[in-house]
Image (spheres, grey):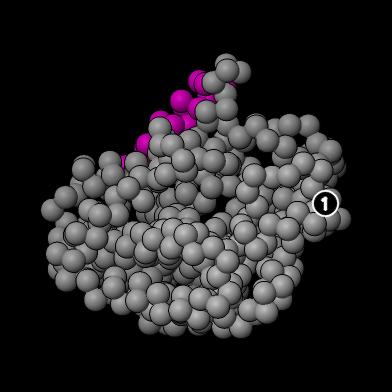
Amino acid sequence: MMTDRFAPRPFFMLAALVLFFNRVLLPFGLQYSLLLTPFLLYFLVKAGKAKEVFGLCGVFATWSLVHLSVIVSLPAALLSFALLCATIIFALSVFHRLVVLDSIAALFRWLAKVNALLLIVACLVYPFEQLRSLCWYLNEFTPNHVLIPRLKIFELEAAHYSMTIVPLVLYFIFKVLKRFQFSDFLLLCTLIASLVLSFSFGVLSCLVLTFLLLFVLRLTKIYRSFRLKWFFLAGIGSTIVVCIFLFVIFPDNPLFFRLNNVLTGVDTSGRGRTYEAFILAQKILQSQAASAFGIGLGQLKIVGRTIIIQYYSYTSMPDVVRLPNSTAEFMVYYGYVGLALRLAVQVYCFFRFRVHQDVYKMSVFLFVFVYQFTGSYIFNPMEYVLWALAFAPYPSRLTFKSFTVQ
């Protein structure tokens, strides 16, 4: 069985490296989570988890045999399969580490402190235009709106960074509700400030929907919990008051402007990450007559290039085309059958690991389940960290068990 002997500090530093600095100083799109694959595989095999690793990789390898008749680039397929295996190894490593880790509360506090320090660094860097792009996302926020720098720290874009800190935000919300401590409340404030400054519309929308779903699904138990009940009521009331205030005092605020662009279809990013990704996925599958089982790993950028370019009528040819939606991307690679199995496995794990019994795990599950239809990509390590946090059966002595609402 995997032990916790590498915690706290070395493991904590490794976790911070992967979460906040995963691409720093690395060329060609490499990530530290990918470079760690040989070491993670060694520890999994040593811990007796070899069957899980090779079993999952074997399932996807067998599935890939179906794609031999439609694959147009074998090298691209092999490279993507290697990335898939590395992602599987990373996800299993995170899952099994969480199962035995005694210091999750300390780990989350450490990561929140690192985030607070990075937030200070980002604020100090902001006045210097030459350095601003290191920590701030300077691309267009939404069409026809003035540029708004958004916090991204060292990620590719603000949405990736926002997704990284979501589990920390959720953790400290329930931590403060369970037992108020000023240090935890201060860390929560820095995390919320980071989330607001990153201003990722997709992540913020999914968080709002997460709490609404949590409120509906756990209504009876929340009603019995005084703090949770007032948290949700205060949250709903505050949201209504803020919206009314913005509508009356500042009707042209960035939030309403982006929301209007999304609802009217002007916002290309919102369209591309949601329904257009599935429209394009369907077109790509139909072009190869591979709707049932998909076109195979690594083929999207080759097969889908012409379809995506024609759909968006690009005036300048992009170097790489992609679908910025992990579920749509998965559907292209593995078809409708693969998509159905993906969702079935998520539902099975939800009940298998009794996610519904823990309000924190429930909130993480709801967030990542919704978010997978609005963004991300299938090799995104942070998405699998979220799934691991939702499914890992933490030891009963951990503070996460105290989040259970009786």
Dot 1 falls on a residue whose secondary structure is loop
- The residue depicted at 53 percent of the width and 47 percent of the height is 160
Task: Name the quadrant of the N terminus.
Answer: bottom left
Judge whether residue 112 is colored magenta: yes
Give x and y (percent) for residue 291: 65, 80
Report the magenta stretch's main SS: helix
- The residue depicted at 57 percent of the width and 24 percent of the height is 132
Query: For residue 373, what is the image quadrant?
Result: bottom right
244 vs 150, left or right, is: right
| Res. 258 in view | yes
Q: Which of 340 and 281 is in front in this view?
A: 281
Q: Name the residue under label 1.
A: 313
181 vs 325, left or right, is: left
Q: Is residue 279 above or below residue 19?
A: below
Total numbered labels: 1
Give x and y (percent) for residue 189: 49, 40
Task: Name the quadrant of the C terminus.
Answer: bottom left
Q: Is residue 290 above or below residue 164?
A: below
Q: Give the range drawn in magenta.
A: 108-126
- The kind of residue tagged 1 is Ser
Give x and y (percent) for residue 297: 51, 66
274 vs 152, left or right, is: right
Judge whether residue 156 is colored magenta: no
Q: Nearer the viewer, residue 381 or 302?
A: 302
Q: Nearer the viewer, residue 333 or 22?
A: 333
